[in-house]
Every structure is written in C-alpha cells, then in structure tokens.
Image (cartoon, coloured by chain):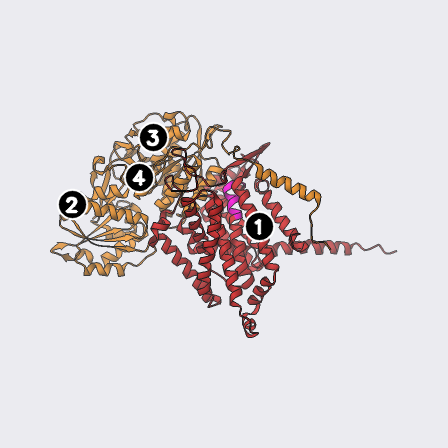
Chain colours: A orange, B red
Amino acid sequence: MSKSTFSRRGVLQTGAVAGAGLAVPTIFTASSAAAFTNEPTGGTVTLGFNVPQTGPYADEGADELRAYQLAVEHLNGGGDAGMMNTFSSKALKGNGILGKKIEFVTGDTQTKSDAARASARSMIEKDGAVMITGGSSSGVAVAVQALCQEAGVIFMAGLTHSNDTTGKDKKANGFRHFFNSYMSGAALAPILASNYGKDRKAYHLTADYNWGYTTEEAVRTSTEAMGWETVAAVKTPLTQTDFSSYIAPVLQSDADVLVLNHYGGNMVNSLTNAVQFGLRDKLVNNKNFEIVVPLYSRLMAKGAGANVKGIFGSTNWHWSLTDEGSKAFVKSFGTKYGFPPSQAAHTCYVQTLLYADAVERAGSFNPCAVAEALEGYSFDGLGNGPTLYRAEDHQCFKDVLVVKGKENPTSEFDLLEIVEVTPAAQVTYDASIFGGELGSCNSGA
Amino acid sequence: MLGLKKSDSRLLLLVAGITLLAPFILNPFPEGSELAQFNAGYPDLMQRFVIFGIFAIGFNILFGLTGYLSFGHAAFLGVGSYAAIWMMKLLTMNIIPAIILSVIVAGLFSLLVGWISLRRSGIYFSILTLAFAQMSYSLAYSVLTPITGGETGLQPKGSDPRILDAALVNGTTPKANLFGLQMGSSFDLTLGSWVFTFNTGFYIAAVIMLISFYLAIRIFRSPFGMMLRAVKSNQNRMNYTGLNSKPYTLAAFVISGMYAGLAGGLMVAMDTQAGPERMFWTASGEVVLMTILGGAGTLIGPVLGAGVIKYMENILSKINSDILHGWFAFLPDGLENLIVNVLYPFIGKGWHLTLGILFMLVVIYLPGGLVEGAQRINRLFKSKSQNDSKAKPEPAE
C-alpha cells in the first residue's frame, strides 16, 4: 500500500551517484591536464570550420568551405601550394602545422548565433578543435568570437563587415582579415565625390540591424565630410522582399543619390526595385540620379543581374586582381573547383594560412603565443598588398577596392570591374573610436 | 514516493537515472573510433538536451493537456534569456538571480500574451501567439537594439557593472557560476579508450529538469490537470455547465511560459549570450515538433522528442562528405561515390530533410509519437510472451 519506492540501498546508491556528480569541484577543469585548451598531442591538429550551410548565406558558406578545404590541402603539402608561394612569410613548409597533419571538422551555423555557438562548442568540446574560423554575418561572428574567448581558442573571423567585430565587441582571441563598414565609407567617399560631385543630396535605405546601422553611419559620415547632404535615412526590415513602398518616397524627395545599405538578397531586391522605378534615368537638380551600394559581393552582383551596371560599391578582394598572390589563388581554386573564388573564399583561405603561419612562427599552438605572433604582424603576397594585423583591435589594414558593375560582362563571373584601389593609409582609423575592450588573451589554462 | 503513484515514481526514477548517467549513456563509442562521430556526451549537447527537455515539458503542459497550440513559445524563452543576461550584466554572474528573474519576467510576459490570445481558441489562438512571438523577434532585432543588442545580441563584458561581484582579474572574461562553481568546468573520466565528461553546468541543469519534470507529473495528476484535460475534450460543454475555463487555460499558459523562461535562463547560464533568433518562429515551431515527435500529452514524450531533434541537429549536421568517403573507403570507387551521393542529401546540411521524413513517418504511423512506438513494442513483447506461454500447453496425457 505504501507509495514509496525508497529502499535503504536505493537511497544510498542514488546519494552516492548524485554526490559524486556534485562533488566534482572546479579544480578538475577540462584543461587541468594540458597547458591550454585542446593542446594537440598526437600527429594531427584539428581546425573547426563553422560556416552557414543552410539559410540566406548558404552560397557564401559553400564557397568558404571550398576555400578552407583548399587551404588545408595546401598546408598539408598537396596541390600547387597556392598563395603559400607568394606569401611574404616563409615559415610554412607544406607539412601541416608544426609537423602535425591538419584535420578539420565542419559545422552549420545556419546564420543564427545560437546554432553557430552550439556548433562551435561541439567542435571545441567534442572534436578538440584548437582554432575556429568562419561565419558570414557579423552577429554570428561576434557571438562565436565571444565563445572562443571564453573557451580559450583562437577565432579567425570569416566574412563579417560590421565595425563591431573588431570595434565594440572585439576580443583578444579574435582576429579579422576582412574589411569593415568604416573602411567602405572612407574608400567610397572620394570616388563618389570625383564622379558625382560634392553637392549631392543622399537618401539612405538601411537594413534594420547592426550591420546596416554601422554601414549607414560610415557612409554618411564620410560623404557628409565631403559636402554631401543626407536628406533622409530610412530603415527597412531585414525580411522585406519588395521595396517599392520604400522607393516611392525617394522619388518625392529632392535627393539625387540613393545609398542602399543592404546585403545579400535584400540588396538584390532593393536595387532591382529602384531600377524598375526608373530612378537611374531621372534628372534631379539637373544631375543624373545615382545609386550606391557600399558592400558588394560577386554573388550579389550575380543576383541583381544587369541592374548593377555602373553602380559603385566596395569589396575586400576581387578575383580579377593581377598581383602574384591573387593570380596564384585564383589559379589553384579554379583548377580545383572550375570557377573563380569569391571574396568570402579569399578571406577564409587567407585567414587559415595566417593562422598556420602564426603557429609556425610562435612555435606553439598556445592561443596566447599565436595571438602575440599575429599582433602587429606585417605581411604581403596574400592578394591585398602590404597588410598589417593591428595589435590594438586585431583588425587587418590593407588596400580597399572600389568597384563598379561592369557594363559589358564577358562571363557570369566577370560582373565587377575595379575602379580604384584605395591605399590602406586612407582607410586607417584610430583604434579607440568604436570603444570596446580587447581584454587579455585566454588560453583556457 | 513524494506523493506520486507507483508508476509515476518509477518513471521519475527512470528519468533521473538516465539523466544522471547521461555522460555514460551518450558516449557509447570509444574515442578515436569511426563511430565516435555519433557520441553525444559532450557538455554543450548534454546541456541542450536537458534545457530543451524543460522547454518541451512546459510546452506540453499547455498543448498536451489543454490542446491549445501555441505557436509563439519561443518568445518566452527569448524574454527569459534577455532577463537572465541583464541580471548577469548588472548584478552578478551567479546564475541563481538570473534564473529566478528569467522565470518571473517570462511569467509576466506570458500573462500579458495569454490574457489577450486566450480570447480565441483553435487556429486563431495559434496565429495570435505567433504574431506576438514575431513581434517580439522584430522588436529585439531592431527597434529595441539598445536593450537587446539587436542582431549581435548580448554577452557579458568586462566593463559591465556586476555590482555584487568582485572585480575581475585584469583582462579575464566573466564566467557564469553557482557560488564559484563554474558552469563550464568539467571532469574527464578515462576508462580504457572511453572518455566520459562530467560537466557542472549539465548536472545543475539536469537537477532543475528533474524538479520541473516532477512538477509536471504533479500538475498532470492534480485536479487542476484534470480540468485542463476537460478543456481539451470539450470546452463548450464545460462553459455550458457554468464553469469559467479561462482562468484554468490562462494558468496553464503562464505555467508553460514560465517553463520556457526557465529554459531561456538556463541557456544563458550555460552559454552566456542571448540573441533575437531564439524568438524566431522556427524556434517556436521546433518545440511543437519536439512535443509531437515524442508524444503530446505524455509525460516523457516531449523530453524524448527534444533529445532526438537536438541530437540530429548537432550530430547529423556535422557529418560532411569527407567523413562519408572515409566510411565507405573500403568499397570500389564507383560504388563508394554512388553510396555517398545517395546518402549525402540526408546528412550534413541536409539534416532537416531527414528530420522531416522522420516527422512524417511518426505522424502517419505513430500518431502518439515515439512514446506510442515504445508502447507498441512493449505490447508486442508482452503478447508474444503470453502467446508463448499459451503455445506451450501441458502435453496431453
């Protein structure tokens, strides 16, 4: 009749198990045996490639993964060694990293911070990854970067353009090679002034999230500094697919330039709408109406088709560059996959090489040693000319490309032409302007 | 035991046993073997199992008992997360105030949403809750950026006030803890080539899940639970007898909202960050899937469903084509490529497809979810053993 199933023995057993579970104190941290998190002890080292394989940026993610696989192949001594031949540092020998063969695990970020962190944590906790890289949106990059800081591994950011990644959310264990909104603005403004004049009235349409805000601010500040006037800045929901209701008011205003702070599918749709509304054939204030897209990618240009012709924007790298590094990379990527790499692929490939090189130079996988080797490191031959990894915010400073949609594309990949290579000095800013704190490196020990 | 019927206390003990021994159960394959890919016994996933278990248990109190299908439960999870992270930023990195506040805030928010949405039932109720959740998502994503951090979300920073905590050692990152016991700390037990990880955060979350599970059993078996079941079977008849069912449904809604808030608070405690996509409608849909997959209205079903979905999301999605090629490398090249090409769409980034197929099969053939499947197998064995005993009659003399 008793409802109790407690027996003395049962209670003792349960108590013992629960007690054992609870009594495990903090001194037994996962890393207590090793000098730092996931110290590679065998003949291999594991890297984690965390890219969006589903969701809105799946195309970019797929290209990033291709680049990572190519980088691993080259670092392990396979293929034609790509940019390792043109890289100014000769520490890499094509025998893996510090003689350890590189293995990798992949994960799907789904372009969601939670999923990205779950995937990164499984790489760190389960697969023993000593470095995490990837990401193709700033929210994800910031979230994963904070996780890597906590866990004590290095994070090499992939495609992330918001100022925040190395600005207010910068972390000592995180490094970014890609450029940012500020640099886009600083590089674009002079070109816009020389092509469109200094007395323009700009109308901004801005994607309503962090990246949109920082991009709008960057373009605004740098164009206003040249004498442009900002008529209005309207935020558009990220999920918007039809922008006609946002384009119509542009026609009513007396603005003569439209700046589309949109990325990916957003930009494809808003630009298509704007062109359909005949904005580009209009004359306002006796000037031709113009459209500007601060951040361009080849995949976006492809989506927008003929509408991108003659439209200015900025990009981190383009496969038509003719320096030795770019040529070598385009050649080995093209040989392996049959088409030229995107800027996302380029930055991911370079980040992997830079990490491997930093480990070789530091002589250790310890995140703190690697961070020290990367900080303030100047290099060349990776497609962007002389580049500096600034120690204060772990941001790369290099030339920025101003591009324009090609009038007569010769192939489906040949959509953008380089208008100008803005020198690094012109886009360099003071490390403290975005706030944030780097903290000190965490090796997880 | 603890005021439960014998079968219920057996179930509770079973769940307790499985949860507390999870590090062993989830790591059946030795480290370094090909099958280690399928091990799930690492802290992050174990924590996710129990946290989403709590979320699904709470959802089941509303959906399983009253039949009200809320399509916006992720909003409460998200609100709970934001409450917890703010508590950590402002007050202390100790998880207790964070979790308590997350439950309270989610409870208040669900009271508001429930009070409005429960004026309607059926599909209209679902759409109203969905609308609220999407509204919260959009607000968090853009308009409320100063509070929610927008797309980037919130993380604890070195410069946060944390008025109750001692100052950090220069440059280190603040870590969630329970009176100094860090959530991320774990202990590895190596037995031969097997490695079992015992993680502090997981055990804290597991104990909280067991308490939630116990509470859910009590609610299921209480007169209040009976009233909720009556709402499900015929609300009109209840109303005609002069009984106002609204307070009961509202109470159920708030309770399940608080469970969601608890899950959200725990998520932050285990992994200190909160972002808006936690509130996106797909997240709300996910908990519906978990509950239906496991078995709506059953006690253990939602926990099972949460486990299956999280396992697929985290394990299946990580198998890439290189790993597949590794598995089938012993086959001749043509055959290897063929098999890899056939399998590849279903794993790695195609894990959603596999989940969809599984979900369809369950809904069509096992409307009661995985629990019904287990019951059928159970019955099969029972009837078989009965048949066996019948089939062996005493030999006739």
Tell me the CA gap for discs 4 and 3: 15 Å
Using the rendered image of the protein, determine whether residue B323 is visible from the camera's viewpoint.
Answer: yes
Tell me the CA gap for discs 2 and 4: 26 Å
Between disc 3 and disc 1, the foreground one is: 1
Q: Secondary structure at mark 1?
A: helix
Is residue B130 placed above or below A199 in the rendered structure? below
Q: Which chain letter goes with mark 1?
A: B
* Residue placed under numbered mark 1 in the picture: B211
Are dots 2 and 1 in contact, CB under 8 Å?
Answer: no
Asked which quadrant contains residue A314, the reply is top left
Asked whether, in this view, residue B219 is left or right of residue A362, the answer is right
Between disc 2 and disc 4, the foreground one is: 2
* Image location (x, y in percent) of residue B81: 44, 50
* Residue placed under numbered mark 4 in the picture: A178
* Residue placed under numbered mark 3 in the picture: A374
Asked whether, in this view, residue B34 is left or right of residue A429, the answer is right
* Image location (x, y in percent) of residue B332: 51, 38
Residue nearer the viewer, B358 or A79 = B358
Are dots 2 and 4 in contact, CB under 8 Å?
Answer: no
Which residue is at a point 50% across and 59% down the rendered structure image? B254
Which residue is at a point 24% across and 39% down the rendered structure image? A400
Is residue B192 placed above or below B291 in the rendered structure? above
Within 10 angstroms of label 3, few (less than 14), some, or many (20 or more) residues? many
Which residue is at a point 62% across and 45% down the rendered structure image? B17
Q: Which chain letter goes with mark 4?
A: A
Q: Secondary structure at mark 4?
A: loop
Q: Which chain letter goes with mark 3?
A: A
* Residue placed under numbered mark 2 in the picture: A226
Residue nearer the viewer, B63 or B161 = B161
Are dots 1 and 4 in contact, CB under 8 Å?
Answer: no
Span shown in magenta: B41-50
